[in-house]
Amino acid sequence: MISGGGTGGHIYPAIAIANAWVEKHPGSELLFVGALGKMEMQKVPEAGYRIIGLPIAGIQRSLTLDNLKFPLKLLKSLRQASKIVSDFKPDAVVGVGGYASGPVLYAAQRKGIPTLVQEQNSYAGLTNKILAKRAGKICVAYPGMDQFFPSDKIAYTGNPVRKDILDLNGKREKGLAHFKLDPEKKTILVLGGSLGARTLNQAVLKDMKKLDKAGYQVLWQCGKFYFKSMLEETEKADLKGIHLREFIREMDLAYAAADVIVSRAGALSVSELSLVGKPVIFIPSPNVAADHQTKNAMTYVDHHAAWMLKDSEAIGHLKSKVDELLFDPITVGDLGAKIKELAKPNAANAIVEELEQLIG
């Protein structure tokens, strides 16, 4: 049983773990448990797996009516999770983070079923810290996680990622052709996630005329929340070098075509980018728990494997930062090599091995 979700950063590693397990143990039965109304309820069935939803939801930062409903939703989810675990009788339960993982792993642990926690970030979430006390194994993506978890339970596996980005060799020309990019120009890939990132979009919007005039081309995933307004602005400007997309499905081709990547620093993005081996400028979101995106990015900055631009400084400074990087080919090469040193290409299989040991 695999539980969790809420964002792609939780869901895609969960699906990657499931795929790796089924590939090695094709006769297995898998069940996902997510939160009703969250994206896992769509993405997991699309990947070919069964999922059950719990009514669990998070606590809002502001005082809302939903917060008053939280205790009732939690109690209902705990009861449902206990029944789901009893009915399915899993040999092991994996929690990948997100609202649903708490009740499900808690129920499994109370019934003596082996549990594995997969922590994607460099700063552990509260739920995972609580669940880790009774978990059999905690799989992490960053060194130094013994500040949050018992060291004897930690396995440094990395974050599981999509298979198609593991090998980008020979895909550059295909990527340039697919996105109708000019092979003579430097390509900047801007990624704000599937929903979009306001600061990244505003930063590109502010500098897009300068970037176009300087001879760059920008492959820009702006996200569904911002696509309509960004499309109006780019059509008005009519710039040949700005290639706007609401969402990019062919991420392997986008990565292969890029000369430099500008991205948020969510756990999944960071893990994918370490495998890609291209120079990266992280602009971490400040609107996340415990500012964990900055902590994710700083792990790479401290290793001289990436650059970071603060969210508060990004608008108006994007082009100058890109210039500074691309005008220095030695740094470009060093960043690409250093970030690959932190890559964990076999993370999903490593987690499967930990699960096998738990099950015995």
Image (tube, grey):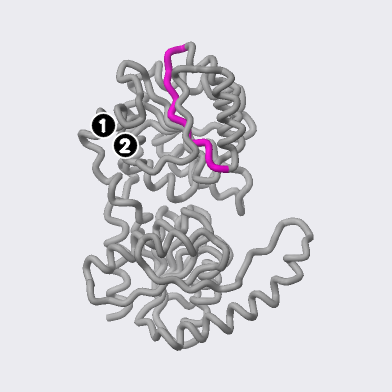
Can you give x and y, in whole percent of width and height, for residue 224 in the image?
A: 55, 42
**How many residues crowd around disc 2 within 10 Å: few (fewer than 14), some, or many (20 or more)?**
many
Look at the numbered disc 1 and give the secondary structure of its residue: helix
Q: In which quarter of the image is the C terminus?
A: bottom left
Residue that badge 2 annotates: 253
**Structural distance between the alpha carbons of marks 2 and 1:** 7 Å
Query: How many numbered marks are there?
Result: 2
Can you give x and y, in whole percent of width and height, for residue 54 in the image?
A: 56, 73
Can you give x and y, in whole percent of width and height, for residue 51 in the image?
A: 44, 71
**How many residues crowd around disc 1 within 10 Å: few (fewer than 14), some, or many (20 or more)?**
some
Q: Is residue 34 visible?
A: yes
Q: Which of marks 2 and 1 is nearer the N terminus?
A: 1
Give yes or no for contact between labels 2 and 1 (Cβ–Cβ under 8 Å).
Answer: yes
- Please say whether residue 223 is one of the residues in the magenta stretch: yes
- Please say whether residue 354 is one of the residues in the magenta stretch: no
Q: Quadrant of residue 280?
A: top left
In magenta, the rendered stretch is: 214-224
* Residue 174 - label: 1
Q: In which quarter of the image is the N terminus?
A: bottom left
